[in-house]
Image: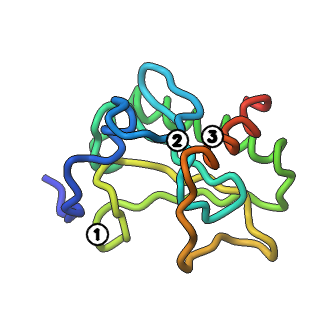
Amino acid sequence: MSHIVLPDAYPCAFCDYLSGERPYTILLRDDLAAVLVTREQRGVSHVLVIPIRHVPTVLDLHDAEAHAVMDLTRRVASAIDQADGRPGISIWQNNGVAAQQAIPHFHIHVAGTVQGGGTEWDEVDELTVEDTDKIADHLRPYL
């Protein structure tokens, strides 16, 4: 049994995005994992890599899901590198409220660094789906 305390955020937004119940930009998807373009861009071409199945934390992933998620993480990091030419790529993942996990569905953040390096941790504007669709269109040729 895990000691991780999950955020109380149900229904799961990521599950709603994957099912089409709520509009969101899905850059890439296979049977086990997907890449979403987040509406809160904390880096240059900031995306989220998630398992298709509702999986709260890294401790809950099956081996095949873990491999699929990491394969997509590497693939989209390469696409961001090629498309945006940033001097760095930030990759992070949080498990539980104490680690600042906001949505109780495992996800890995992948983002090109901002001007001066790192990522934007302060408040950022929430983009429209049309804006995130443009980011997806920008990345797709490099996938």
Label 1, label 2: how far apart the Cα atoms are? 22 Å
Of residues 76 and 138, which is closer to you in this image? 138
Q: Are marks 2 and 3 in contact (CB under 8 Å)?
A: no
* Category of crowding for the residue at label 3, using alpha-carbon neighbours closer than 10 angstroms: few (below 14), some (14–19), many (at least 20): some
Q: Secondary structure at mark 3?
A: helix
* Residue type indicated by callout 1: Val
- Residue at the outermost bottom position: 122
Label 3, label 1: how far apart the Cα atoms are? 30 Å
**Quarter containing the C terminus:** top right
The residue sitting at 38% across, 33% down in the picture is: 18
Q: Position of residue 75 (x, y in %)?
A: 67, 35
* Category of crowding for the residue at label 1, using alpha-carbon neighbours closer than 10 angstroms: few (below 14), some (14–19), many (at least 20): some
* Residue type indicated by callout 3: Asp
- Residue at the outermost top position: 31
Of residues 61 and 86, which is closer to you in this image? 86
Of residues 81 and 70, which is closer to you in this image? 81
Would you name the residue on which mark 1 appears? 97
Would you name the residue on which mark 3 appears? 133
The residue sitting at 30% across, 74% down in the picture is: 98
Would you name the residue on which mark 2 appears? 36
* Residue 129 to residue 53: above or below: below
Q: Position of residue 27 (x, y in %)?
A: 59, 34
Q: Earlier in the sequence, mark 3 or mark 1?
A: 1
Q: Secondary structure at mark 2?
A: strand
The residue sitting at 37% across, 31% down in the picture is: 20
Q: Earlier in the sequence, mark 1 or mark 2?
A: 2
Q: Quadrant of residue 142?
A: top right
The residue sitting at 67% across, 62% down in the picture is: 43
- Residue at the outermost left position: 1
Say left or right for 51 vs 87.
left
Can you tell which of label 2 and label 3 is closer to the viewer?
Answer: 3
Say left or right for 38 vs 10.
right
